[in-house]
Image (spheres, rainbow, N blue to C red):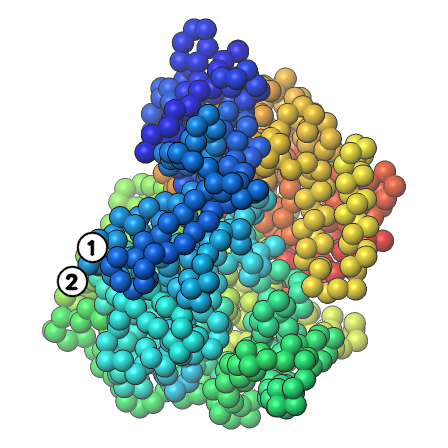
Amino acid sequence: MTSTLEWSCSDAGIRFTLSSADGPVPVSLWARADPLTVEGQKANVAPLTATIERTVTDKRDAEEVTVSHDEIEALGEAQLAQLGLPTAAPLRIRLRGRGVLTTGDFRFEYQLVRHNGQPLMGVRRTGAIMHAGRERHTLLYPLHSILSEIDAFNETAESADAEKRLFHWARLKELLPESAEVDGQLRTINVVRADAFTLDANSRGEIEPILRHRRSQDPRYQVDGGDAMDSDENAAFEPALPPASQKSFAERFQSASRVSRRYVTRDNWYIALPPAVERALEVVKDYQQRSRGERLAFIANPRRFIADELGDDVSADLLNEIFEETPEFLSQRVRCLGEWQPKTFAYSLPSKNDWFPDEGASGGVLVDFGNQLIPVSTADAEPLRARMQEALDAGAVEIEHGEYRIPVSEESLERIKAATAKYEDTASGIGPEDGPSKQSESSADSYSHEETGGTQPEPEQDARVPLIEDNLEAVGFDHRPHPKRGEPGGLPAVLQTTSLYPHQKDGLRWLQEHWACGSNGALLADDMGLGKTLQTLVFLAWVQEQNERRTASLPFLVVAPTGLLKNWEDEEKRHLARPGLGELCFAYGTRLKEIAQLHKHERKELFARAGWVMTTYETLRDKILLFADVRWGIAAFDEVQKIKNPVSLTHEMAKSVHADFFLALTGTPVENRVSDLWSVIDTIAPGQLRSLKEFQSRYETEVNKSEPEVAANRVAELREALLEKYPPPRILRRMKEQQLTGLPAKHVHPLKESMPTEQAAAYEHVLQTLRSNAERRSSALIALQNLRKVSLSPDDVTNDGLDDNTIRRSARLNATVRELDRIRAAGEKALVFLEYRAFQDHLLAFLQRRYDMERPPSRINGQTTAARRKKIVDEFQASPESEFNVIVLSPKAAGVGLTLTAANHVIHLSRWWNPAVEDQCTDRVFRIGQSKPVHVYYPMAIHPSYPQTSFDTNLDALLERKRSLSSGLLTPADASKKDLNDLLSRSLG
């Protein structure tokens, strides 16, 4: 239908309406329209997709949308044209100050100036839209933000609120582009607004706040969910101060008796603290002045202490915004558990799966020298510092470090010193020959006293956390079987599901055997879709009935990621007749505060009355003392890979739970390395795999260094210990295709499509560019990203949108649309997995137009709320069987916890690096309850000149190889650095 997109501007934002000859068009139908602007140019509502989604959700029959000026300033010029908005202002700012910045009469004066230096006269501005005579423009970022902040600052000029003026100037200083002309006097002043902070600490408990400010983000090709291609460039914050200024701030913060709203460093940096940051730093200041033991307890979990101290003054969401747990701080935090000291075990944490650049040897750090990140190992840190000092004294310009050249400067020296200091802090810790750390008697006695109960209310803030034998360096705690608990067999009376599948009956019997023989715990590692939750619920009900015959039942604790808790609740109601497992207690979220305020014995009674208690890993970590003094019948950990890091606080708090039986659940017990498995087994059966040090030596180091035959024997030995020995075996793992007879047929369709001419040319250009930089290790990550992008589409879809021409120029999109056409003709439904949010916006609009859908297809990604997810799923599942429909989903955000069996087609438009994630996405459709054959499509763009080495060909081969190996339990599913290097090498030819 022909329609006109119109807009109007007010202080609240820009209001858009769409009208046709028949009148206003409902917002839900906008993407179906073929609109024109008021000037008669082709329009496109794709830039409004997110706003349309929100509007339709709130009001189905809405006929207008309003977009804030802050959202408008983030648009690109192409998007302005699509919406019929004025062109971006081709202007710059001339800015000068009148008066002294710190006085009340200081004001900013500015002019909008053409590039030839001619100022515009008679400028009028409403938000992001400006008028000057007959000219009308849109002020994009940062022009709109700068002018808004200048106006806000000038409005405070006559007030006595110096802090408020400084805040606006700090925000303005962050926004100033290079094209803005600032008088020399202002350029000599560096004013920064500290949006957030993190902490640095050492084993002595000395705490230093590190100020951070928000990093500008480029929304183009922003990946939704997951960490496969993330890098530090995607961090929300960056350092607010250079090292020397940060050091000066830390010294003044430490020496002052109280926290100030403003700080001035020795090198003339002005620092403004927002109120929330100031209040949070008051907590840090308080703990700086406390005893060493209290400081170390604070370091162990600062977020919890800050949240508890601030109470309702700062919300959890706001705290998340102002306190950033950087990788450096996390590493220091998780090592400090134990004897109130940082962990000293040399556990080499796996990389974040960004694979590139190489972060150097284990024990090293990446040191930021301004324009490059350089790996510095523990052994190299002190020699490098000495060489830098010598070069500085000699007046040298640069020094070499391996293949890198480092500029010689005081700043470089400070950065190396900071790295050296981190090593010195841990150098005096327990070495490999010293054995495990021991808890101090006072600390252990204090915790034991806490467990005995008592009649006094629990304090609101408690600096203690359970101190455990961690089994890192040596086995300090070994599992001891319980007495026999009865006989296995039978089904619980409350089970109302008509029948269990054979493999589920076998799984239940395996769990019953564990329980009956007095086992401490088990790992149910079934493949996704085999019903781990159902098997667990039936087992819990069976144990509950067994206990009731002999003595009062102990409550069950279920720990799961937040997104899966609703699924547990729903499954219990679905499969178990009332009373099911009994009263359910929600020990997380808003309910947690009420529980925390209960008297100790009231809390224990609450848990005892409940048949089962659900909480999250984060709650267990932060509020462990609400759970540690309760004896649980069974503690079930869903998606137990959440505790795979053996030196993390989450891992140790999970181990500290007092339960008769530990049940671990996961479909991916080994994600990054075989030691992931140790972390789980040492939680459910402490000591079975000996210490982590021994385990790593035998099953990682020796396997990697040994001849193939020796390595195979080691792997076979471990498999026997876990999958065969100790009847019943500690681990039960079944793969879906091998176990389920009721699964539908699954047809996999590799859609190898030759690249159109335009895409082939763009791909060739990327290849040539990458080949010329092949020797630069730092370019590897960029290389992979560029190959991924051009293999999806040669066009900048963010600006150009999606139409038939852009589809034609992309092999993957061509193949996808062709299959969707067939699916629509058959009256069936499909899921399309794609991680790029900006691309999703345009794909939704294109699909609605192409298939004449009444409203835009639904989308589930990392920004979709839990309530919205449930509504989308319910509507999709309830839609008529013969009606075509499609949902666009992000792999990491929608890969678990969803049942979408109304669809029987899955299209992986973009592919994830881990085949387990990809299979989890497919399993939204390929699962019990699916009544139709399932079709899985892998669109692949094949370059006509490189059919065997095209990126998509190589990626498909890598994923298939990892998929075949991952079913063997002991092979990590994630692609390794070597895998990705090989992928890049093969693609470059």
Q: Residue at x 73, y 65 (%)?
A: 777
Q: Is residue 861 visible?
A: no
| Badge 2 amino acid | Leu
Tell me if mark 1 has few (under 14), some (14-19) or many (20+) residues whose alpha carbon lies within 10 angstroms of its own: few
Mark 2 or mark 1: whose residue is earlier in sequence: 1
Tag in front: 2 or 1: 1
**Residue receiving disc 1:** 159
Give how far across and how far down residue 87 sits, in percent: 52, 31
Residue 851, disc:
none
Tell me if mark 2 has few (under 14), some (14-19) or many (20+) residues whose alpha carbon lies within 10 angstroms of its own: some
Q: Residue at x 40, y 63 (%)?
A: 192
Q: CA separation, marks 2 and 1?
A: 47 Å
**Residue receiving disc 2:** 598
Left/right of residue 506 with respect to residue 26 in the rendered view? right
Q: Residue furthest top?
A: 22
Left/right of residue 84 with respect to residue 164 in the rendered view? right
Left/right of residue 80 with respect to residue 753 in the rendered view? left
Give how far across and how far down residue 808 sits, in percent: 72, 27
- Closer to the camera, 232 or 137? 137
Left/right of residue 610 with respect to residue 901 in the rendered view? left
Above or below, 866 relative to 226: above
Q: Secondary structure at mark 2?
A: loop
Q: Is residue 224 visible?
A: yes
